[in-house]
Amino acid sequence: MRLDVVTIFPEYLEPLNVSLVGKARARGQLHVHVHDLRAWTYDRHNTVDDTPYGGGPGMVMKTEPWGDALDSVLADGYEAGSREPALIVPTPSGRPFTQELAVHLSERPWLLFTPARYEGIDRRVVDEYATRMPVYEVSIGDYVLAGGEAAVLVVTEAVARLLPGVLGNAESHRDDSFAPGAMANLLEGPVHTKPPLWRGRGVPDVLLSGHHGKIARWRRDEALRRTTAHRPDLIERCDPKAFDKKDREMLSILGWEPDPDGERYGRFWRRTDGVEE
Ligand code: ADE
C-alpha cells in the first residue's frame, strides 16, 4: 500500500517511522511519502491560507497550493506504478471513522491524506478531486483538533495493522472490538499476565484454571459488563439473536432487558430501571 500525506507540518508525521507502521515500512509492506504543502507556494511568505469569503473567524486554506500539490503527488505515484488513489480528508465534519471504514480502506492500494489547519480547505479542492477518485471525509471523534495530522496518524495506524502480514497473527483482528460482522460489537474485557500476585492483587482464578469453556464464558461476561458500563449504545443496538442464554442472564444481572418495541426503533435492549441512556 502507498500512503501520501500533504501537510504544512511534515514533522508531525514523524511517528510514522516508529512501531508497527515504521516496521511495516521497513519491511516494504507500506510505502509512505510525506510532503510539505509549502513546497507548492510561490510567494515570499509561502502563503497557504486566506480570509474566508462571506466573512467569519479564522482562515481558509487556499485552492492553488493544494491543487498543485495533489497534481504533483498523483503524477509521482502513477509514475511509480501506483493505481486507484483515494483521497482521505480528515475533518470534524466528516463521517465517523470506524473499524468498518478501516477495513475498507485497508483494501485500497493507495491513500492520499490532506490534513488541514485553520478552518479547513476551500471546498472546491475536494469537489475537484472527487470527480477523479473516491473521497472519504472522515472525523475521528466528536471533538475539534487544531489540525488533521493527528487524525492521519490514527487512521494510518488502524489501517496498517489490518494489512496482510503486518500483525503477526492473522486471527488477531477477527476478535477486535468493533470487528465488522462480529455477532455483537462488545468492548473487550480486562487482561492479565504474570506475576500471579502483584501488590496483594491476584488474577481471577478462572484464568488460571485451564478450563477453556469457563474462560471463554468469563471473558464474555466481562465484555458485557464493560460494554454496558462504557457503551450502552452498543448494547441497545445488538440484535437479540447475537446473545445466547448465558449472555441474556448476564445482561439481566447487569440491569438490561429486551425492549418489546425493539424492532420498530432499532433499540433492542433497555435498562430495567427505566433510565434512558
Ligand atoms: N480535524 C480537526 N478535528 C478533527 C477530527 N475530530 N477528526 C478529523 N480531523 C479533524
Image (spheres, rainbow, N blue to C red):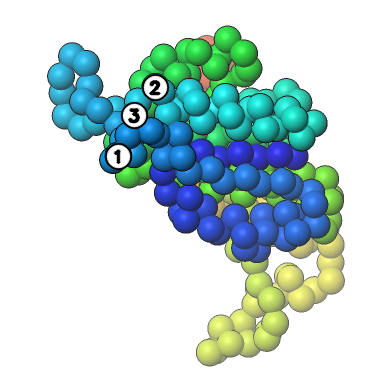
Q: Secondary structure at mark 3?
A: strand
Q: Quadrant of residue 121?
A: top left
Is there a contact, CB below 8 Å, between mark 1 and mark 3?
Answer: no
Distance from Cα at disc 3 to Cα at disc 2: 7 Å
Asked if 202 appears above or below 140 in the picture, the reply is below
Label 2 belongs to which residue? 63
Amino acid type, residue under disc 2 in the picture: Thr
Label 3 belongs to which residue? 61
Distance from Cα at disc 1 to Cα at disc 2: 18 Å
Distance from Cα at disc 1 to Cα at disc 3: 17 Å
Taking the image as drawn, is residue 79 in sight?
yes
Label 1 belongs to which residue? 44
**Mark 1, mark 3: which one is toward the viewer?**
1
Taking the image as drawn, is residue 107 in sight?
no
Residue 199: x and y in percent read 53, 89
| Viewer-nearest residue: 257 or 63 | 63
Residue 176: x and y in percent read 69, 47
